[in-house]
Every structure is written in structure tokens, then in C-alpha cells.
Image: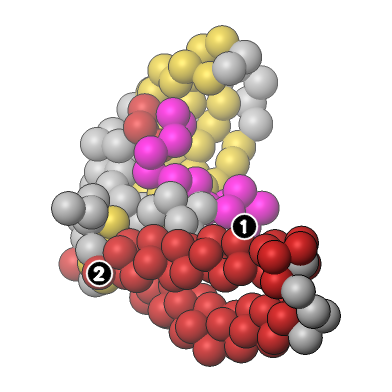
């Protein structure tokens, strides 16, 4: 049984879009590559054909994995979430107690995580240290560089 993952509306739409792309255009590209390789002659000594068939297998495995994730995906109604504590989909403004740097992250599912856009996985060490905290609380988080103290300045949706 797949693990239930929670998504924003945007993240769930992106996941569905990717599955649809892989099933249509992705499969068509693979089929064309196989047909092209098949046209090059003897299949028993055709490395290009073997590579295309292997790519097809990996492509189908990726579709199956994403469909499994999609089947266990749940949409969270952000308007009903409690903003007094850090939860999945919370947008949290933090202050590093050591150097005073302020940062803002949104806690999202693993597949939605994108550090460049300020989205971190709820399974990351920082998010794990923040879950359940309230404004003013300090999280001590173990990171590869040691331990950092992060103060929760603001929680929003």
C-alpha cells in the first residue's frame, strides 16, 4: 500500500499533468525510437533497438510509480488548516539564531519540494524539526553542518 501524501491544488495538478504527458507524448516518442531502431536491420545485433526497449521499460515504470503516488494523493483544503502551529503546507518565516538570517519556507510533499521556490519537503530535517511548533518557539535542527537553532517568526497559509 502506498503512503498517503498531501498536496496543494497546484502540486496535484502538476502531478496529473506529468502523468498525462508521459502517457501520451512520452509513449509516442519511445514508440518512434523503437520503430526507427527496428528499421535499421537485424534485431539480434541492434544495440539501438535494445536501448530503446530498455528506455520503454523505464518509462513505463515511471508511469506506474507516478500513478501509484497519484492514487494515494490527497488534496488539502488550505483554508481549514490551523495557523497557530506548523503543519504540512504551512508557510513559515524563520530566523537563524546564530547568524540572524531570515528565511521563509513552505512545507510541502516530497514531490512538490523545490528549494529555489522556497518549498521544502515535510520529510526534510528542517521541516521535521518545525512540525507542531508555534510562533516564538525555537527548533533545534540537526543538519549536515551540525545543529542550528531556528526561531519561528510567523506561520501562514
Judge whether residue 64 can be spotted in this image: yes
User: 13 or 145: which is nearer to us?
Assistant: 13
Q: Is residue 87 left or right of residue 20?
A: left
Residue 99 location in percent, x, y? 66, 21
Number of on-image labels:
2
Which residue is painted at 45% across and 62% down in the image?
Answer: 61
Mark 1 and mark 2 lie on one chain; the one further toward the N terminus is 2
The correct choice, above or below, for 5 with respect to 41 in the image is above
Say which mark, if any, is on residue 68. Answer: none
The correct choice, above or below, for 138 with respect to 17 in the image is above
Q: Residues within 10 Å of mark 1 (few under 14, many from 20)?
A: few
Say which mark, if any, is on residue 71. Answer: 2
**In which quadrant is the C terminus drawn?**
bottom left
Residue 136 belongs to the span the image colors magenta? no
Q: Is residue 43 left or right of residue 70?
A: right
Which residue is painted at 51% across and 53% down in the image?
Answer: 113
Residue 104 location in percent, x, y? 54, 47
Q: Is residue 128 left or right of residue 32?
A: left
The correct choice, above or below, for 128 with respect to 58 in the image is above
User: 101 or 48: which is nearer to us?
Assistant: 48
Residue 118 belongs to the span the image colors magenta? yes
Residue farthest along the right direction in this orientation: 40
**Pointer 1: what residue?**
117
Q: Secondary structure at mark 1?
A: helix
- Which stretch is magenta? 114-126
Q: Secondary structure at mark 2?
A: helix
Which residue is painted at 51% across and 12% down in the image?
Answer: 147
Amino acid at each position: 500500500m502506498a503512503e498517503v501524501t498531501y498536496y496543494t491544488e497546484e502540486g496535484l495538478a502538476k502531478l496529473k499533468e506529468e502523468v498525462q504527458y508521459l502517457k501520451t507524448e512520452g509513449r509516442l516518442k519511445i514508440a518512434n525510437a523503437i520503430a526507427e531502431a527496428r528499421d535499421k536491420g537485424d534485431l539480434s545485433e541492434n544495440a539501438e533497438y535494445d536501448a530503446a526497449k530498455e528506455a520503454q521499460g523505464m518509462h513505463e515504470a515511471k508511469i506506474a510509480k507516478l500513478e501509484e503516488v497519484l492514487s494515494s494523493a490527497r488534496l488539502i483544503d488550505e483554508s481549514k488548516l490551523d495557523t497557530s502551529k506548523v503543519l504540512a503546507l504551512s508557510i513559515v518565516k524563520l530566523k537563524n539564531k546564530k547568524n540572524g538570517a531570515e528565511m521563509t519556507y513552505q512545507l510541502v510533499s516530497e514531490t512538490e519540494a523545490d528549494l529555489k521556490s522556497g518549498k521544502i519537503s515535510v520529510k526534510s530535517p528542517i521541516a521535521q524539526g518545525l512540525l507542531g511548533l508555534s510562533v516564538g518557539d525555537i527548533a533545534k535542527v540537526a543538519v549536515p553542518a551540525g545543529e542550528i537553532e531556528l526561531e519561528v517568526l510567523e506561520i501562514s497559509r
